[in-house]
Amino acid sequence: MLTKRIIPCLDVKDGRTVKGVRFEGLRDAGDPVALAARYAREGADELVFLDITATNQKRATLVALVRDVARELDIPFTVGGGIGTVSDVEALLMNGADKVSINSAALARPELIDELAARFGSQCIVVAADARYHDADGWQIYTRAGTHNTGRDAVQWCREAADRGAGEILLTSMSNDGTKDGFALDITGAVSRAVTIPVVASGGAGSKQDFTNVFQQAHADAGLAASIFHFGEIGIRELKEHLRQDGIAVRL
């Protein structure tokens, strides 16, 4: 049985880790290098680093900061934000990233997924899908740090990304993000059923039971969270003990 993964996320703005609610109202959560070192010690399975203003500011990801974070880690490290070319990916992989996460650039030119998978291997390519629920249209995909509605159906886009060679889907429910009301089980389950690659659930984690639910009911392969870890509300070790007691395989 494959173990389920617990992944802290560092949303980085101006060199600092930040966290908001539904992508708004950001507050400082600490130094990303120090947080990365802490999570590696505490038993995180992977770490995600998202430069959340790179795309809107039309600049590359903070490579030097990525390198500093990578030095603290002995676990897989995914980096996203402002990635749009083969050379962007190459620079990040050379500076400590194990995987890269692409979002806006992939939606603008979906062939980028094919090109990156062919060049670096699918195992390095994560497609991030930011989805918001609308009563009339269901789950729609957003880009540019959640500011632009593409009008694309979330499940269809995730399926296309997988077909083009993505090795993993990082699915964030913007409707749940930062609310601590639990993961969006409906869209997570729908995407998990639609693709054959791992799905990382993100957005809404507020309790240990939320992780049990997303693994058992929505069949996610990993659960990603930020504020509950950053602000010490739930420890990674205690979360994994809870999951194991619920019969979910995790790496201790």
Image (cartoon, rainbow, N blue to C red):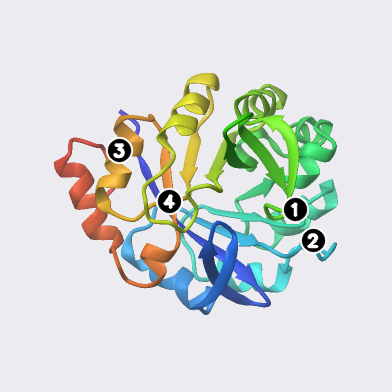
Q: Which of the two discs, 4 and 1, labels the residue nearer the N terminus?
A: 1
Q: Which of the two discs, 3 and 2, labels the residue nearer the N terminus?
A: 2
Q: Is residue 163 above or below residue 92?
A: above
Three-letter code for the amino acid on which mark 2 is drawn: Asn
Judge from the rendering whether residue 250 lies leftward or rightward of residue 86; answer left or right: left
| Circle 3 residues within 10 Å: few <14, some 14–19, many ≥20 | some
Residue 240 location, x and y as percent? 25, 51
State the mark number for residue 213: 3
Instruction: Answer whether labels 1 and 2 touch (C-beta < 8 Å).
Output: yes
Q: Secondary structure at mark 1?
A: loop
For residue 75, say whether it is visible.
Answer: yes
Q: Which of the two discs, 4 and 2, labels the residue nearer the N terminus?
A: 2
Q: Which of the two discs, 1 and 3, labels the residue nearer the N terminus?
A: 1
State the mark number for residue 204: 4
Q: Mark 4 to mark 2: distance in Å?
A: 24 Å
Residue occupied by mark 2: 56
Residue 151 location, x and y as percent? 74, 33
Judge from the rendering whether residue 171 lies leftward or rightward of residue 5; answer left or right: right
In front of the other: 214 or 36: 214
Q: Mark 4 to mark 3: distance in Å?
A: 12 Å
Q: Secondary structure at mark 4?
A: loop
| Circle 2 residues within 10 Å: few <14, some 14–19, many ≥20 | some
| Circle 4 residues within 10 Å: few <14, some 14–19, many ≥20 | many
| Circle 1 residues within 10 Å: few <14, some 14–19, many ≥20 | some
Q: Mark 1 to mark 2: distance in Å?
A: 6 Å
Q: Residue at x 67, y 38 (%)?
A: 141
Instruction: Answer whether labels 4 and 1 touch (C-beta < 8 Å).
Output: no
Number of numbered tags placed on the structure image: 4
Three-letter code for the amino acid on which mark 3 is drawn: Asn
Q: Secondary structure at mark 3?
A: helix
Residue occupied by mark 1: 144
